[in-house]
Amino acid sequence: MMFSAVPKQVIDVVWNDVKEILEPAIKTAKGKLSVKDVYEYIKNGIYELWVVMENTKIVAVITTRVIEYPERKALA
């Protein structure tokens, strides 16, 4: 297995596979976030996209973002 960040400049290359994995998680999350929102946040550099691959297949997807507090930063 391989774990890797996906540069926002190439998100469109993997988006269909990523979207398929993200949709069920987004539907069960509390809040008003949509798959389109996540796509836009990645494209705008707000979220970072990570993929876990087994051979050439994406098997898991993770999004992260940095939250800035007055005295520190945190990863969400």
Image: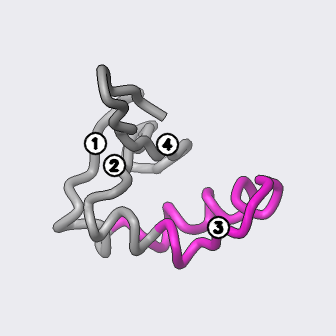
Alpha carbon of mark 4 to alpha carbon of mark 3: how far?
15 Å
For mark 2, what is the residue?
Answer: 48
Q: Is residue 25 left or right of residue 59?
A: right
Task: Tell me whether the residue at label 2 lies in contact with that at label 4, contact meaning CB atoms closer than 8 angstroms.
Answer: no
Where in the figure is residue 28, as x and y percent of width and height?
Answer: 82, 55
Alpha carbon of mark 2 to alpha carbon of mark 1: how far?
7 Å
| 2 or 4: tag closer to the N-terminus | 2
Task: Tell me whether the residue at label 4 lies in contact with that at label 1, contact meaning CB atoms closer than 8 angstroms.
Answer: no
Q: Is mark 3 on a helix, strand or loop?
A: loop
Q: In this view, does 52 lie to the left or right of 10?
A: right
In what quadrant of the picture does the N terminus appear? top left
Alpha carbon of mark 2 to alpha carbon of mark 4: how far?
8 Å
Q: Which residue is drawn at 35% across and 63% down?
A: 42
For mark 1, what is the residue?
Answer: 5
| 4 or 3: tag closer to the N-terminus | 3
Where in the figure is residue 13, as x and y percent of width and height?
Answer: 29, 71
Q: What residue type is labelled 3?
A: Leu
Alpha carbon of mark 3 to alpha carbon of mark 2: how far?
16 Å
* Residue interval drawn in magenta: 14-38
Which mark, residue 62? Answer: 4
- Image depth: mark 2 or mark 1 in front: 2
For mark 3, what is the residue?
Answer: 33
Q: What residue type is labelled 4?
A: Ile
Q: Residue at x 39, y 38 (%)?
A: 67
| 1 or 3: tag closer to the N-terminus | 1
Q: What element carries label 2?
A: strand
Q: Which amino acid does label 2 sit on?
A: Glu
